[in-house]
Protein backbone atom coordinates (compact mmCIF):
# COMPACT_ATOMS: atom_id res chain seq x y z
CA UNK A 1 0.00 0.00 0.00
CA UNK A 2 1.46 3.33 -1.04
CA UNK A 3 1.31 6.54 0.92
CA UNK A 4 -1.12 9.19 -0.35
CA UNK A 5 0.90 12.00 -1.89
CA UNK A 6 -0.24 15.40 -3.08
CA UNK A 7 1.67 18.02 -5.02
CA UNK A 8 1.61 21.77 -4.59
CA UNK A 9 3.00 24.87 -6.22
CA UNK A 10 3.02 28.35 -4.71
CA UNK A 11 3.24 31.43 -6.91
CA UNK A 12 4.67 34.63 -5.49
CA UNK A 13 2.86 36.60 -8.19
CA UNK A 14 -0.63 35.39 -7.23
CA UNK A 15 0.19 34.45 -3.62
CA UNK A 16 -1.91 31.35 -4.14
CA UNK A 17 -1.26 27.64 -4.24
CA UNK A 18 -2.08 25.19 -6.95
CA UNK A 19 -2.91 21.85 -5.34
CA UNK A 20 -3.35 18.41 -6.83
CA UNK A 21 -6.58 16.54 -6.07
CA UNK A 22 -4.73 14.42 -3.49
CA UNK A 23 -3.47 17.59 -1.75
CA UNK A 24 -7.07 18.79 -1.38
CA UNK A 25 -8.01 15.37 -0.04
CA UNK A 26 -5.20 15.36 2.55
CA UNK A 27 -6.63 18.58 3.97
CA UNK A 28 -10.24 17.34 3.85
CA UNK A 29 -11.39 19.26 0.80
CA UNK A 30 -12.38 18.57 -2.76
CA UNK A 31 -11.19 20.66 -5.67
CA UNK A 32 -13.35 23.76 -5.88
CA UNK A 33 -14.26 23.86 -2.17
CA UNK A 34 -11.64 26.52 -1.40
CA UNK A 35 -8.84 28.53 -2.96
CA UNK A 36 -5.64 27.25 -1.32
CA UNK A 37 -3.62 30.08 0.21
CA UNK A 38 -0.56 30.22 2.43
CA UNK A 39 -2.74 31.22 5.39
CA UNK A 40 -5.06 28.25 4.82
CA UNK A 41 -2.11 25.86 4.61
CA UNK A 42 -0.64 27.24 7.83
CA UNK A 43 -4.02 26.98 9.58
CA UNK A 44 -4.06 23.21 8.90
CA UNK A 45 -0.63 22.66 10.49
CA UNK A 46 -0.74 21.32 14.04
CA UNK A 47 -0.16 24.30 16.38
CA UNK A 48 2.77 22.43 17.97
CA UNK A 49 4.52 22.30 14.56
CA UNK A 50 3.37 25.61 13.09
CA UNK A 51 6.25 27.86 14.15
CA UNK A 52 8.89 25.35 13.02
CA UNK A 53 7.21 24.85 9.63
CA UNK A 54 6.99 28.62 9.08
CA UNK A 55 10.69 28.96 9.94
CA UNK A 56 11.54 26.26 7.41
CA UNK A 57 9.43 28.02 4.77
CA UNK A 58 11.45 31.21 5.40
CA UNK A 59 14.69 29.19 5.30
CA UNK A 60 13.67 27.73 1.93
CA UNK A 61 13.23 31.22 0.52
CA UNK A 62 16.62 32.37 1.83
CA UNK A 63 18.68 29.33 0.91
CA UNK A 64 16.89 28.55 -2.35
CA UNK A 65 17.39 24.85 -1.97
CA UNK A 66 15.30 21.79 -1.35
CA UNK A 67 14.06 21.17 2.17
CA UNK A 68 12.09 18.39 3.79
CA UNK A 69 10.02 18.57 6.94
CA UNK A 70 8.05 16.05 9.00
CA UNK A 71 5.01 17.54 10.70
CA UNK A 72 1.33 17.00 11.44
CA UNK A 73 -1.61 18.56 9.65
CA UNK A 74 -5.23 18.50 10.80
CA UNK A 75 -7.89 18.12 8.13
CA UNK A 76 -11.39 19.60 8.09
CA UNK A 77 -12.72 16.55 9.98
CA UNK A 78 -10.13 17.05 12.77
CA UNK A 79 -8.18 13.96 11.65
CA UNK A 80 -4.46 14.18 12.21
CA UNK A 81 -2.09 13.31 9.35
CA UNK A 82 1.62 12.80 9.91
CA UNK A 83 3.17 14.10 6.72
CA UNK A 84 6.51 14.60 5.07
CA UNK A 85 6.66 17.76 2.98
CA UNK A 86 9.45 18.27 0.47
CA UNK A 87 9.78 21.57 -1.37
CA UNK A 88 12.17 23.50 -3.57
CA UNK A 89 12.18 26.95 -5.08
CA UNK A 90 11.03 27.59 -8.64
CA UNK A 91 13.26 30.02 -10.49
CA UNK A 92 13.02 32.00 -13.70
CA UNK A 93 16.35 33.43 -14.88
CA UNK A 94 17.84 32.99 -11.38
CA UNK A 95 14.91 34.79 -9.73
CA UNK A 96 12.77 32.84 -7.29
CA UNK A 97 9.18 32.98 -8.52
CA UNK A 98 7.61 30.32 -6.37
CA UNK A 99 7.86 27.06 -4.53
CA UNK A 100 7.02 23.55 -5.73
CA UNK A 101 6.81 20.37 -3.74
CA UNK A 102 4.88 17.40 -2.50
CA UNK A 103 3.32 16.21 0.73
CA UNK A 104 3.20 12.51 1.62
CA UNK A 105 0.82 11.20 4.28
CA UNK A 106 2.84 8.74 6.38
CA UNK A 107 0.10 8.17 8.98
CA UNK A 108 -0.89 4.65 7.88
CA UNK A 109 2.74 3.57 7.42
CA UNK A 110 3.70 4.88 10.84
CA UNK A 111 0.68 3.16 12.41
CA UNK A 112 1.53 -0.14 10.69
CA UNK A 113 5.16 0.12 11.77
CA UNK A 114 4.19 0.95 15.36
CA UNK A 115 1.71 -1.93 15.42
CA UNK A 116 4.34 -4.35 14.07
CA UNK A 117 6.92 -3.19 16.62
CA UNK A 118 4.42 -3.49 19.46
CA UNK A 119 3.54 -7.03 18.39
CA UNK A 120 7.23 -7.94 18.21
CA UNK A 121 7.81 -6.48 21.69
CA UNK A 122 4.88 -8.46 23.10
CA UNK A 123 6.21 -11.65 21.48
CA UNK A 124 9.70 -11.03 22.91
CA UNK A 125 8.19 -10.35 26.30
CA UNK A 126 6.25 -13.61 26.17
CA UNK A 127 9.44 -15.49 25.25
CA UNK A 128 11.30 -13.84 28.12
CA UNK A 129 8.51 -14.66 30.57
CA UNK A 130 8.49 -18.29 29.42
CA UNK A 131 12.23 -18.82 29.96
CA UNK A 132 12.07 -17.03 33.33
CA UNK A 133 9.20 -19.30 34.38
CA UNK A 134 11.29 -22.32 33.35
CA UNK A 135 14.25 -21.07 35.37
CA UNK A 136 12.00 -20.47 38.37
CA UNK A 137 10.74 -24.03 38.06
CA UNK A 138 14.30 -25.36 37.97
CA UNK A 139 15.25 -23.44 41.13
CA UNK A 140 12.05 -24.59 42.83
CA UNK A 141 12.88 -28.22 42.04
CA UNK A 142 16.64 -28.15 42.65
CA UNK A 143 16.71 -25.80 45.66
CA UNK A 144 13.21 -26.47 47.04
CA UNK A 145 12.12 -22.81 46.77
CA UNK A 146 8.68 -21.26 46.50
CA UNK A 147 7.86 -19.49 43.21
CA UNK A 148 8.36 -16.07 44.84
CA UNK A 149 11.68 -17.05 46.40
CA UNK A 150 12.89 -18.52 43.11
CA UNK A 151 12.06 -15.31 41.25
CA UNK A 152 13.66 -13.21 43.99
CA UNK A 153 16.84 -15.33 43.76
CA UNK A 154 17.00 -14.83 39.98
CA UNK A 155 16.37 -11.09 40.32
CA UNK A 156 19.02 -10.60 43.00
CA UNK A 157 21.56 -12.59 40.97
CA UNK A 158 20.75 -10.41 37.97
CA UNK A 159 21.36 -7.25 40.00
CA UNK A 160 24.55 -8.51 41.63
CA UNK A 161 26.09 -9.70 38.36
CA UNK A 162 24.73 -6.81 36.30
CA UNK A 163 23.29 -9.26 33.77
CA UNK A 164 19.84 -9.41 32.26
CA UNK A 165 17.42 -11.66 34.08
CA UNK A 166 16.49 -13.31 30.79
CA UNK A 167 20.14 -14.18 30.06
CA UNK A 168 20.56 -15.78 33.48
CA UNK A 169 17.33 -17.72 33.02
CA UNK A 170 18.42 -18.91 29.56
CA UNK A 171 21.78 -20.11 30.95
CA UNK A 172 20.06 -21.97 33.77
CA UNK A 173 17.61 -23.65 31.37
CA UNK A 174 20.48 -24.56 29.00
CA UNK A 175 22.33 -26.18 31.90
CA UNK A 176 19.59 -28.79 32.37
CA UNK A 177 21.58 -31.11 30.09
CA UNK A 178 24.54 -30.89 32.50
CA UNK A 179 23.39 -31.86 36.01
CA UNK A 180 26.62 -30.84 37.77
CA UNK A 181 26.66 -27.43 36.09
CA UNK A 182 22.96 -26.98 36.82
CA UNK A 183 23.40 -27.78 40.51
CA UNK A 184 26.39 -25.42 40.78
CA UNK A 185 24.52 -22.60 39.04
CA UNK A 186 21.45 -23.08 41.21
CA UNK A 187 23.56 -23.07 44.39
CA UNK A 188 25.40 -19.92 43.27
CA UNK A 189 22.17 -18.10 42.46
CA UNK A 190 20.55 -19.06 45.75
CA UNK A 191 23.66 -18.67 47.95
CA UNK A 192 23.99 -15.00 47.00
CA UNK A 193 20.52 -14.39 48.36
CA UNK A 194 21.39 -15.70 51.79
CA UNK A 195 23.87 -12.86 52.34
Image (cartoon, rainbow, N blue to C red):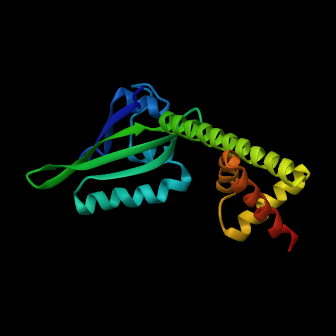
Q: Quadrant of residue 131?
A: top right
Asked if residue 124 can be seen in this view, the reply is yes
Q: Residue at x 29, y 57 (%)?
A: 60
Identify which residue, 57 or 181, lies in the foreground: 181
Q: Quadrant of the C terminus?
A: bottom right
Left or right position of 60 against 29: left
In the foreground, 158 or 8: 158
Q: How many numbered dots are placed on residues in this image?
A: 0
Which residue is situated farthest in the left direction here?
93
Residue 35: % across, % down = 39, 34
Where residue 88 appears, x then y in whole percent?
A: 25, 49
Q: Residue at (37%, 33%) from the top-left corner?
A: 5
Q: Nearer the viewer, residue 48 or 137?
A: 137
x and y percent of residue 43 in the render?
A: 50, 46
On screen, residue 65 versus residue 156, left or right, reads left
In percent of width and height, residue 182 lies at 72, 53
The quarter holding residue 31 reads top left
In the picture, which quadrant includes the N terminus? top left
Q: Which residue is at 75% across, 64% downward? A: 157
| 27 lies left or right of 157 | left
Relative placement, left or right, of 155 versus 84 is: right
Given residues 121 and 140, the one toward you in this image is 140
Report whether residue 12 is seen: no
Note whether 182 is above or below 190 in the view shown. Answer: above
At 32% from the left edge and 42% from the top edge, which residue is drawn?
Answer: 16
Q: Most extreme residue toward the front, as rendered?
A: 180
Amino acid sequence: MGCPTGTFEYSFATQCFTWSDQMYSLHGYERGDIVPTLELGIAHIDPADRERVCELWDQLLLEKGPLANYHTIIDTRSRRHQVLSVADTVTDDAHVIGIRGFMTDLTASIHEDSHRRANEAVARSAQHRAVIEQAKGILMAVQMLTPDHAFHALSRHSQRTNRKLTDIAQNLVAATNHPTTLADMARTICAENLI
